[in-house]
Image: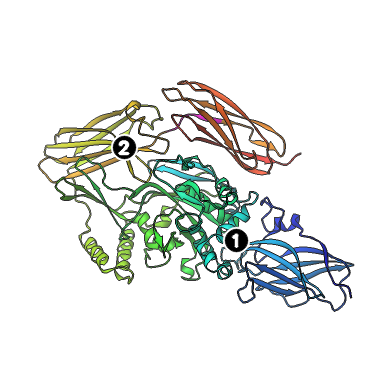
């Protein structure tokens, strides 16, 4: 009998991809979701004879084996069930057979090679196929019940990341582009570049059926601290040997740069870039994921749930990188079989390399419910994430002789306006209630004390730290009523280039007269809270009569701050106020964020596939000086090929210019167009515009 050989095959991509919600991937390969059947047709060199069987084999990773579940061997005529791989004959006509193939809902994800063995006994490789997590079926650990959430957290290619400060929250458009050409290969390569894979590739691949394992490996590999990671972190403000973090508008260009340039870590990134990258990789692999921003985010370096911020007698901070104006991380949805069903659901991860976790720079996955309930003894890194949103802040004045005095103890400052993009819109939704009970409530304080008690009972916390925790818990008391109250306020959010006009109000809340010594400073800081430059300082002595309130007018001119503020800087106003003759001091702060020069995009809301259309960008120079060395970048996956750039003439103050680009839409659906303006005075002024690409009529 002639050896049975496959001559050709049909992957039925036009049917299988939509059924598996993978038709958006820009790939000609079969991309499928586990636990869900798919159809294939095979043409042989002769008909299948009566009594003749075919053996289908699916191999993944190096040295695949059935014991590691990296090899599946299935006879065509044999028992099949939903808990294991199965191949079921649909039709057999002449030299052609059609089959339905199903994988288990807990199969290893990744790239498989499918082979067929006929009467010769020699396997014939047929094709490769990708198998992904499947949030649409209940048997998968990443099953997400709500269809609108699946559309948002798995299939949406564009997003919004919220940045700024608690009083000035701004949306930043981000393109995930998880379905771009080669993205699925790149995202799986991230796994292959991990320490785990290098140590034992066979074991590593065999554990890729578990989203917990995959998430822990991936978010540790995205940074370059420990391994051949994707992105190098940098908060120095100096990026001449790489790309400024604020220049990035999406993930795919970073991942492709890393992949196609020999896995050399890309320079540079900060927290929102890591958050965008992680979201891209997980959505590509089928894990529901969203980006979270926490305002007034704590970096608890001492792991004791308390932050001590020290200032000198002029009100200048002596600490760095303790409280970030905002910090970005991710949540992914899956079950926690290691902890039990009470901890299923959203799992919190931080890909920004801040602290070690089990010897490597990574953080999480920490169950969101464990953070809310103060279960800081659970894995992974629940205590660190709990402190990020709910640490207590104590402010101290350090005098020239080295002595210290506590100024305040604030239980409500950390963890404000925790935000994510809404499902189905670009609105901001507040998820603070998912991380902690309302500030000031009995439940919130009870949970905080529960967290301290768990640390005191933990065998992993050393004795000295337990003594410090016990001392802090015993002395922890709310602030007493103060004689002086005050606050900074802005007339309006300033445009970069404008003078800043502010008011410092101080009120005597007592029935007696007081005298207040006020030390004021203005400094440029990074969003991490790191001090860069002192811009201005002044001191005043104010007499305040009973219940009297006085206003101090403060103006920072553009000439005063222009040398010290770039596009990613903030100005922090600080006032240290001392009631003369008493030990009472209050510390007042306000961060000033800038609006950017005006830029708009004009393009039709609906455009047609493969039909060129013009996009006009309109720029107005709102700065009081000439903008030189101007350039405009335009990018948008499925709208333009790569990044388009145009050099612009110098722009005088108040000047307006219109620049035109040609779009060539190549992919159907909602697409995001992002424009970036750079100049000698200001960089990375961005504007985004949404368009919908339809098929040709």
Camera-side residue of 432 and 96:
96
Instruction: Give the position of the N terminus as an image quadrant.
Output: bottom right
**Which picture quadrant has residue 600?**
top right
Horizontal side, residue 657 vs residue 64: left or right: left
Image coordinates for residue 495, horizontal then vertical, percent: 41, 30
**Which picture quadrant has residue 564?**
top left
**Which picture quadrant has residue 111?**
bottom right
Instruction: Decide whether the magenta segment is chiefly helix, strand or loop.
Output: loop
Which residue appears at 35% of the width and 27% of the height?
558
Read off the residue under disc 2: 533
Image coordinates for residue 354, horizontal then vertical, percent: 40, 55
Image coordinates for residue 595, horizontal then vertical, percent: 43, 33
Q: CA distance from mark 2 to mark 1?
A: 49 Å
What is the crowding at mark 2: few (fewer than 14 residues within 10 Å), some, or many (at least 20)?
A: some
Can the viewer see residue 147 in this picture?
no
Which residue appears at 31% of the width and 51% of the height?
412
Read off the residue under disc 1: 135
Image coordinates for residue 455, horizontal then vertical, percent: 31, 67
Q: Which residues are magenta?
A: 595-600
Camera-side residue of 312 and 420:
312
Horizontal side, residue 395 vs residue 386: left or right: left
Comes first in the chain, label 2 or label 1: 1
Can the viewer see residue 628 in this picture?
yes
Q: Disc count in the image?
A: 2
């Amino acid at each position: 009998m002639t050896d049975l050989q496959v001559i050709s095959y049909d992957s039925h991509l036009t049917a299988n991809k939509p059924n598996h919600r993978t038709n958006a991937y820009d790939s000609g390969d079969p991309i499928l979701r586990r636990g869900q059947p798919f159809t294939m047709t095979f043409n042989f060199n002769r008909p299948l004879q009566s009594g003749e069987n075919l053996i289908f084999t699916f191999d993944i990773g190096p040295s695949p084996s059935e014991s590691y579940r990296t090899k599946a061997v299935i006879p065509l005529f044999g028992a099949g069930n939903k808990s294991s791989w199965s191949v079921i004959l649909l039709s057999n006509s002449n030299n052609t057979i059609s089959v339905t193939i199903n994988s288990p809902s807990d199969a290893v994800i990744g790239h498989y090679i499918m082979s067929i063995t006929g009467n010769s006994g020699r396997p014939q490789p047929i094709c490769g196929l990708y198998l992904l997590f499947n949030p649409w079926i209940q048997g998968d650990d990443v099953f997400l019940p709500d269809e609108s959430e699946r559309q948002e957290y798995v299939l949406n290619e564009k997003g919004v990341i919220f940045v700024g400060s608690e009083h000035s929250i701004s949306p930043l458009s981000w393109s995930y582009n998880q379905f771009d050409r080669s993205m699925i290969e790149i995202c799986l390569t991230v796994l292959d570049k991990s320490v785990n894979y290098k140590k034992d590739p066979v074991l590593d691949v065999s554990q890729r059926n578990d989203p917990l394992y995959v998430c822990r490996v991936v978010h540790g590999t995205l940074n370059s601290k420990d391994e051949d990671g994707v992105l190098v972190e940098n908060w120095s403000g100096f990026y001449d040997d790489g790309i400024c973090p604020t220049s990035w508008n999406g993930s795919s260009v970073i991942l492709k740069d890393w992949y196609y340039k020999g896995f050399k870590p890309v320079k540079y990134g900060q927290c929102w870039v890591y958050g965008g990258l992680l979201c891209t990789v997980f959505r590509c692999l089928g894990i529901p994921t969203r980006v979270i921003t926490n305002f007034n985010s704590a970096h608890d370096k001492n792991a004791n749930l308390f932050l001590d911020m020290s200032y000198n007698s002029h009100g200048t901070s002596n600490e760095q990188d303790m409280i970030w104006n905002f910090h970005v991380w991710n949540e992914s949805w899956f079950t926690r079989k290691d902890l039990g069903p009470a901890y299923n659901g959203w799992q919190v991860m931080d890909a920004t390399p801040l602290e070690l976790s089990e010897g490597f720079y990574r953080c999480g996955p920490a169950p969101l419910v464990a953070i809310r309930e103060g279960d800081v003894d659970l894995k992974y890194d629940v205590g660190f994430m709990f402190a990020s949103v709910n640490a207590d802040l104590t402010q101290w004045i350090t005098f020239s002789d080295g002595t210290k005095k506590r100024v305040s103890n604030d239980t409500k400052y950390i963890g404000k306006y925790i935000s994510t993009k809404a499902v189905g819109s670009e609105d901001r939704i507040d998820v603070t209630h998912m991380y902690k009970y309302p500030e000031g409530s009995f439940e919130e304080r009870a949970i905080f004390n529960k967290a301290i008690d768990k640390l005191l009972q933990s065998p992993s916390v050393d004795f000295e730290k337990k003594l410090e925790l016990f001392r802090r818990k015993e002395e922890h008391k709310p602030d007493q009523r103060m004689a002086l109250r005050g606050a900074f306020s802005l007339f309006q959010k300033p445009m970069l280039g404008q003078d800043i006009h502010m008011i410092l109000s101080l009120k005597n809340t007592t029935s007696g007269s007081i005298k207040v010594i006020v030390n004021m400073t203005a400094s440029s800081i990074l969003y991490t809270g790191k001090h860069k430059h002192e811009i201005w300082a002044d001191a005043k002595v104010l007499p305040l009569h009973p219940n009297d309130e006085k206003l101090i007018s403060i103006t920072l001119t553009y000439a005063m701050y222009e040398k010290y503020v770039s596009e990613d800087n903030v100005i922090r106003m600080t006032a240290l106020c001392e009631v003369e003759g008493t030990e009472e001091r209050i510390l007042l702060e306000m961060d000033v964020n800038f609006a950017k020069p005006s830029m708009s995009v004009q393009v039709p809301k609906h455009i047609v596939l493969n039909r060129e259309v013009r996009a006009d960008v309109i720029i107005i120079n709102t700065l009081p000086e000439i903008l030189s060395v101007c350039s405009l970048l335009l990018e948008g996956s499925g709208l333009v090929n790569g990044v388009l750039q145009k050099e612009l003439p110098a722009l005088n103050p108040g000047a307006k210019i219109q620049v035109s680009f040609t779009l060539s839409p190549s992919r159907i659906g909602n697409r995001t167009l992002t424009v970036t303006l750079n100049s000698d005075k200001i960089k990375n002024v961005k504007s985004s515009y949404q368009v919908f690409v339809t098929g040709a009529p």
